Image: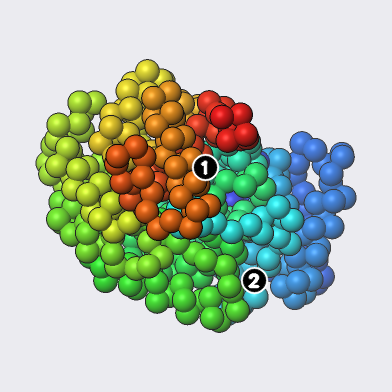
Amino acid sequence: METKTFSAGKRGDKVRSDCYIELSPAPSGIDIELKSKVSAMYGKTLKTQLQSLCDYFELKNVKVYLEDFGALQPTIAARFEQAVKQMFPETKKEYLPEFHPENLYGTTKDKLRRSRLYLPGNEPKFYPNAGLHKPDGVILDLEDSVAPTEKVSARFLVRNTLRAINFYKAERMVRINQLPMGLEDLNFIVPHNVNVILIPKVESADQIKQVEEKVLELKKKHNLENEVYFMPIIESALGVMKAYEIATASKYNCSLAIGLEDYTADLGTQRTDEGKESIFARSTLINAAKAAGIQPIDTVYSDVSNMEGLRESVIEAKSLGFEGKGCIHPRQIKVIHEAIAPEEKEIEKAKKIVLAFDEATAKGLGVVSLGSKMIDAPVVKRAQNTIKLAILNNLLSENWKELN
């Protein structure tokens, strides 16, 4: 009689930083079989982890087979838990790795979001080094980059990654699936210090309100105090027409992004480098975001080999009013940051405005003026952001006021 097995993970010559696990009933006790190129050095450690996982899930009579391809412990734990919950669907236990000590930071609504790097939620090989490339945000993606058959396993991986992998202060983002599936995704990310939730293919304020309600419910359940912000993504003609409604649907919205691949497909046209087919959508989104007081964020640039094309795309996006752009490869980050950086004349103007603001504040004045012109709060805020960008790009010293 054939023994039923329950498996999770990936195997094959091209797999790296991942593993494949099989669980099956055993006559008695725990039987662990290990296949790994590093078993000579780490075999004992791997078997100890697997035994610990068996103990945690109270497995008594089971055979554990592991093919290891350099997986980190959080990945092994995620794959193991998925297999356990196939074998015993009634199991409610979650095996949660300890939080990395560097992973407990929060974020702010107006944080700079020049670049956000997408990482497929089912590919742990990309996680450990993502923050080293210094994107403003790292997105663990549960939606388009994950095949339907991988959706469940990606949740366990993303959850463990949020807890255990150091992103070096990059904003910790997750793109959930389209609703209603995305609401279930929230159970795997909200309790684990996610900073921003990307909500795909939004076409109504109600979708944002559903996410907000679920997030607040989970925060209350888990006694969480950290802020969780939302970045709705507009990807259809209907979404564009309802952009302002969506942008103002929640006080937790920090940004409004556009996804042009799905948008142009919805129009029945092709996306081009010139972008004439999307100018209405992009302009509408920018105006909606600005009117709502949040950041407009541009789509990704899909040709990872064309750095000059990317640079031109960022410059054009900046000229329209966008404040950031998506990345699908780490090499795009530096180009985006450079292209979105302020020019010298922008920096000089910003310096004058900030100094005028400081002087007015020191004198207790409620009005800021520069020469004969009155400077209102949004202009001051924009100048302060310009200074921040200039410092980040090493175009201005942090102590520029002292040197002025």
The residue nearer to you, when weighing 132 against 384, is 384
Local SS, label 2: loop
Residue type pointed to by label 2:
Glu
Q: Residue at 26%, 62% (x, y): give it.
A: 246
- For disc 1, the marked residue is 136
- The location of residue 57, given as percent across then percent down, is 72, 73
Residue type pointed to by label 1:
Asp
Q: Is residue 172 at all visible to an observer of this figure?
A: yes
- For disc 2, the marked residue is 94
The residue nearer to you, when weighing 186 against 316, is 316
The image shows residue 237, relative to residue 305, as above or below, that is: below
Q: Quadrant of the C terminus?
A: top right
Q: Is residue 57 left or right of residue 5?
A: right
Q: Residue at 18%, 59% (x, y): give it.
A: 242
The residue nearer to you, when weighing 107 against 66, is 107
- The location of residue 224, given as percent across then percent down, is 59, 74
Residue sitting at the far left = 268
- Rendering quarter of residue 308: top left
- The location of residue 217, given as percent across then percent down, is 47, 79
Spatial distance from mark 2 to mark 1, Cα to Cα? 30 Å
Q: Quadrant of the N terminus?
A: bottom right
Q: Residue at 38%, 49% (x, y): give it.
A: 368
Q: Is residue 301 left or right of residue 139?
A: left
Q: Residue at 71%, 47% (x, y): give it.
A: 72
